[in-house]
Image (cartoon, rainbow, N blue to C red):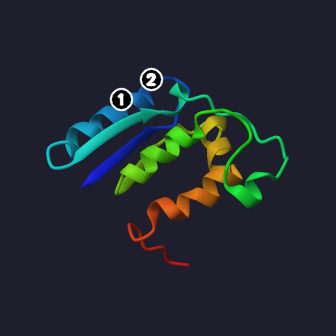
């Protein structure tokens, strides 16, 4: 099984990275594992132009499509995030709120996960 472990911390080598390393070490014995750090990607804030509502593509040139490619590769995605005053870092929130990410993600995971409503 292919597992993506995503470090959602803006601190590349902090405590969250250590947790990512532990999870990876446990999983890579039986699975194909990739790690990514959200801080390695250029994620731009939404400009509200709504182009993505029809195209699922952003007019901005950033790295969200590279993250989506990693999601497409994986059978399982594990997001590891610190808690900053009872919330996750802004980079993680930003990517999950992007319309193009949410519009493309169901295509990426069709048949991989079953969601209970």
Residue 89 percent location from the top left of the image = 62, 36
Mark 2, other Cα within 10 Å: few <14 / some 14–19 / many ≥20: few
In this rendering, position of residue 27 left or right of residue 87:
left
Per the rendering, the mark at residue 18 is: 1
Q: Residue at x 28, y 51 (%)?
A: 2
Which quadrant is the C terminus positioned in? bottom right
Label 1: state its secondary structure.
helix
Compared to residue 54, the image places residue 85 above or below, namely above
The quarter of the picture where residue 55 lies is bottom right
Tell me how many marks there are: 2
Which quadrant is the N terminus positioned in? bottom left
Residue 3 percent location from the top left of the image = 31, 49
Q: Is residue 107 at least partly visible in the picture? A: yes
Residue placed most toward the observer, 82 or 59: 59
The quarter of the picture where residue 35 lies is top left
Q: Residue at x 32, y 39 (%)?
A: 34
Residues marked 2 and 1 touching at CB (< 8 Å): yes
Per the rendering, the mark at residue 80 is: none
Q: Residue furthest left?
A: 29
Q: Residue at x 48, y 59 (%)?
A: 108
Residue placed most toward the observer, 90 or 98: 98
Residue 16 percent location from the top left of the image = 44, 32
Label 2: state its secondary structure.
loop
- Residue labelled with disc 2: 14
In this rendering, position of residue 55 left or right of residue 31:
right
């Amino acid at each position: 099984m292919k597992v993506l472990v995503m470090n959602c911390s803006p601190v590349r080598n902090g405590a969250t990275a250590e947790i990512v390393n532990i999870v990876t070490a446990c999983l890579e014995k039986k699975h194909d594992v990739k790690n990514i750090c959200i801080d390695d990607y250029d994620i731009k804030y939404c400009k509200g132009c709504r182009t993505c509502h029809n195209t699922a593509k952003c007019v901005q040139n950033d790295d969200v499509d590279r993250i989506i490619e990693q999601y497409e590769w994986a059978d399982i995605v594990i997001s590891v995030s610190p808690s900053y005053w009872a919330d996750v870092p802004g980079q993680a929130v930003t990517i999950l709120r992007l319309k193009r990410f949410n519009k493309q993600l169901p295509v990426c995971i069709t048949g991989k996960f079953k969601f209970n409503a």
